[in-house]
Amino acid sequence: MSSADLRDLYQQVIMDHNKKPRNFREMSDANHLAHGNNPLCGDALVVFVKLDDDVIDDVSFQGSGCAISVASASLMTEALKGKTLAEAEALYEQVHKQMTGEDVDSATLGKLAVLSGVKEFPARVKCATLSWHTMHAAMDSDHNLSVTTE
């Protein structure tokens, strides 16, 4: 796939997930959650996680932000449902590396490979990673946590 084709796909997926975010809802039976905030651009969200033993039974988010922030959270929730904590951690690491320009095998990321396009816009990496850092904080604790990226 050419870089122009990848850029077009990136834009299409971002716009689709921003206009119709998946799993955009409060989860009343979540047993883990964290608040994320990026004061530089105004992105703010809450990630809700329902763990059953070490499996992510459900994951959702609520909040507001730019198209990249919302789309990344939407893609993240789709990818994490049904994953074990170890699988989610490995995915978190791979996605973070991908968005910060490190080499990763994009074939292992499936749909999430489209997020590699964010590295073309360094100022937007924090927007795209906010939900991932917030999810990571939510799974690390049973407490209500806050994450701020600047």
Image (spheres, helix red, strand yellow):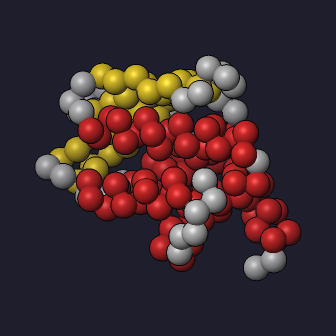
Answer above or below: position of 19 versus 112.
above
Q: Nearer the viewer, residue 146 or 44?
A: 146
In the rendered structure, the answer to whether residue 141 lies left or right of residue 9 reads left
Q: Nearer the viewer, residue 32 or 24?
A: 32
Residue 143 pos. (x, y %): 24, 24
In the rendered structure, the answer to whether residue 79 lies left or right of residue 51 reads right
Residue 100 pos. (x, y %): 60, 53
Q: Residue at x 65, y 44 (%)?
A: 125
Q: Residue at x 67, y 23 (%)?
A: 40
- Looking at the image, the residue that sits furthest to the bottom is 1
Q: Quadrant of residue 59?
A: top left
Split into 4 quadrants, where in the image is the N terminus? bottom right
Residue 103 pos. (x, y %): 58, 69
Q: Nearer the viewer, residue 64 or 43?
A: 43
- Looking at the image, the residue that sits furthest to the front is 102
**Number of marks in the rendered image:** 0
Q: Is residue 53 visible?
A: yes
Q: Is residue 27 visible?
A: no
Split into 4 quadrants, where in the image is the C terminus? top right
Q: Residue at x 35, y 35 (%)?
A: 137
Residue 39 pos. (x, y %): 62, 20
- Looking at the image, the residue that sits furthest to the right is 4
Q: Residue at x 31, y 27 (%)?
A: 28
Q: Quadrant of residue 3?
A: bottom right
